Amino acid sequence: MYLGIDLGTSGVKAILIDEEQQLVGEESSRPLDVSRPHRGWSEQDPELWWQAVTEAVDRLALAFPVQMAAVRGIGLSGQMYGATCLDESDRPLRPAILWNDTRTERQCAALKQVMPDIGRIAGRNPSLGVTAPKLMWLRDHEPDLFSRIRTVLLPKDYVRLKLSGDKVSDLADSSGTMWVDVGARDWSEPLLAASSMDVGQMPRLCEGTEATGRLRAELCRRWGMAVAPVIAGGGGDNACGACGTGVIKDGMGTVSLGTSGVLFVANGVARPSMVHSIETLCHSVPGVWHQMSVILSATSCLNWLAGLLKRPASELVAELGTDLGAPAPVVFVPFLDGCWSPHADASIRGAFVGLNHSSDDAVLTRAVLQGVAFAMRECADAFRSTGTRIDNLLAIGGGSRSELWLKIMATILGVELQVPASSQLGAAFGAARLAIIAAENAAPESILVPPPIRNSISPDSAREESYQENYQTWLSVIPDVRKASAALARAS
């Protein structure tokens, strides 16, 4: 038996799988609160993470005592980038600053100025979400606290510390901090020094497939485990999600349509971009890298429209049918929460362009589906500009249940989309798979296999030209939307 634990921003999910990778049981914690004491801030108390983990695993132990007794490995996944600052006694000095915190615009600019070629080493240019600028903000605004920081851990690695007492982080998660030389797969002293940090404040690095330690004896007793299971390195939520879908070979990828939209493609070599705001990070598997772009608003755009029209989102999409049809005559810009990728722009916001008296619910819904797909296409083009090929993509997330949306996405991206037959995929499953590899010393490719495919959706060749023209129109309006958004932000 193997346990996968995924620490999300809104809660913890724990799953139990057997030797055949079949789901035995799953439990979730109560929702986690996020504190937003100032505009653009997003913080969580690390102790809430531990309470949520114990709550979810306690429930598994109560429901499946026999299976829990046989657990041999534990894998960890979690929200990325969060700065968890510990004192000399390994106690949190303050709430962790989360991935979606946007207070560090000035520090990002300063980091780029200090190291103009930072993207070549770190695999990306500085952006608001990553860890290094967060520490620079603490240095600038909370200097007394900054001087007391002895260790910085990512969220799931704080959970690891509580589980085993080990200060360890995997390369997939840590390469998102901007302190790792992505090509060399090791801490970079120049990157650390640029944000006034040093290697002594960092955890030991490992691959996501490695065993990092064993569960504490008191926790083994609490959860009824006969032998202390090993704990795998694991990874950030997106890398673990890719392990869950078997995306570990060059050219394979996923497009996730959840609250946010994520494009993830595995690479055989590191391909950092010096131009675009895309991430080139280590994968959870040795010798593999990946590129990733995040669109902050995907299905949340559809849910926003549904709230505005006071109709269920599923009803709005269902009314469009499943035929691809012609592009909407209205353009939608989906940056309701700003833009992370492939251009970092915290001030840009969403827009409808081309509205007229005939712009009904159907037109607006189709425009929203297209707008999200256009934003994903812009990310895909940024990947391709570095030499990355995209052979095919697995479509995952709640939005992948819409056949029409997938037809729009496939035609705009110019890539076949494959829909997995199973819904039991995701970061917790990927973490559990990594636990198998660490516990059994198994070959990653024998465990991290792709799922069975329910159906495939190819680009519609008859409509590709019209959607390409519509995409060019979408690109043409972005500069004016960006300019107007900045002006409105200044005026507010």
Image: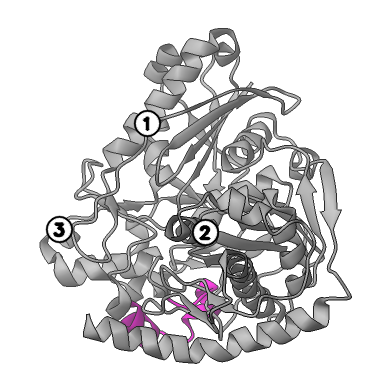
- Percent x, y for residue 84? 31, 51
The Cα–Cα distance between marks 3 and 2, rounded to whole angstroms, is: 33 Å
Q: Residue at the spot x=59%, y=39% of the render?
A: 431
- Percent x, y for residue 168? 45, 45
Tell me where the magenta segment starts and ends, as one range.
108-126
Q: Residue furthest top?
A: 66
Q: Could you tell me the amino acid type at mark 2?
A: Ser
Q: Are marks 3 and 1 in contact (CB under 8 Å)?
A: no
Q: Residue at the spot x=63%, y=35% of the render?
A: 438
Q: Residue at the spot x=40%, y=43% of the render?
A: 10
Q: Could you tell me the amino acid type at mark 3?
A: Leu
In this view, the residue in front, 54 or 322, is 322
Q: Could you tell me the amino acid type at mark 1?
A: Arg
Side of 144 where 175 appears, left or right: right
Kindly report which numbered mark, 3 or 1, lies closer to the viewer in this rendering: 1
Tag 1 residue: 30
On the image, which quarter does residue 222 sit in? top left
Q: Main secondary structure of the magenta part?
A: helix
Mark 3 vs mark 2: which is more N-terminal?
Answer: 3
Q: Residue furthest right?
A: 462
Q: Residues within 10 Å of mark 3 (few under 14, many from 20)?
A: some
Residue 10 part of the magenta segment: no
Tag 3 residue: 145
Mark 3 vs mark 1: which is more N-terminal?
Answer: 1
Kindly report which numbered mark, 3 or 2, lies closer to the viewer in this rendering: 2
In the figure, 226 relative to 347: above or below? above
Tag 2 residue: 260
**Split into 4 quadrants, where in the image is the N terminus?**
top right
- Percent x, y for residue 60? 50, 18
Q: Residue furthest left?
A: 144
Mark 2 vs mark 1: which is more N-terminal?
Answer: 1
